Amino acid sequence: AAIQRKDVIDSGEEITVNTTIRKGKKPRTRKIILRTRDGPCCPVKAMREWSQDDECKQRIGEKIWRDFDKKKELGSIGCSKELRRILDQAEVDGCYAGSTVRHAMMTKLRGEGASLKEVNDFTGHAPGSGIVDVFYNKPIAKDIGALILKDSEV
């Protein structure tokens, strides 16, 4: 999604990002709300620090994701490459990428009790889609034999 600086609204307690996501032929308008959190991972604090950067302040009408070396706006492939660069700097194994982060997040949401509908809404999957559970929230196989013998004194 091509998010511009003007699409980011800071209301004090939270930051709202308005964007349009093009998935298939139908563009969807999304309102992303970032709330203040205690601890080292606060999206509101990170966005505020980033928005105070001199380079960011100059680009009100441009896309916010940018390749500063090449002095151009990043598209989806450029954003993926930038994420890979950050993961490499953090010494994250090369087999993990943006999709892995997304899959882990969906699995964690379902594991923490979020409904399938809530996860589909959050990730932009179609209502009623079971893709989250089919691919990401796989149940752990049970050892039936161990269950049978669980309370026995064998």
Image (cartoon, rainbow, N blue to C red):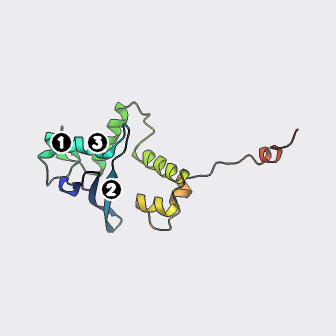
Q: Crowding at label 1, few (<14), some or many (≥20) Cα neighbours within 10 Å?
A: few
Q: Which x, y percent locates residue 15?
A: 27, 53
Amino acid at dot 3: Ala
Q: Which x, y percent locates residue 32?
A: 32, 57
Name the residue located 36 percent from the left edge and 65 percent from the top edge.
24
Give the answer, above or below, for where 95 lies relative to 65. Answer: above
Identify the mark nearer the N-term, 1 or 2: 2
- Residue indicated by mark 3: 46
Name the residue located 23 percent from the left edge and 44 percent from the top edge.
48
Amino acid at dot 1: Gln
Q: Is residue 112 left or right of residue 55?
A: right
The image's mark for residue 37 is none
Q: Is residue 57 left or right of residue 65?
A: left
Name the residue located 44 percent from the left edge and 40 percent from the top edge.
96
- Depth order, front residue of 13/119: 13
Identify the mark nearer the N-term, 1 or 3: 3
Identify the mark nearer the N-term, 2 or 3: 2
Cβ atoms at labels 1 and 2 below 8 Å apart? no
Report how many numbered discs are placed on residues in the image.
Answer: 3
- Residue indicated by mark 1: 52
Give the answer, above or below, for where 104 lies relative to 20. Answer: above
Secondary structure under tag 2 reads strand
Give the answer, above or below, for where 26 lies relative to 61. Answer: below
Q: CA distance from mark 2 to mark 3?
A: 14 Å
Q: CA distance from mark 1 to mark 3?
A: 10 Å
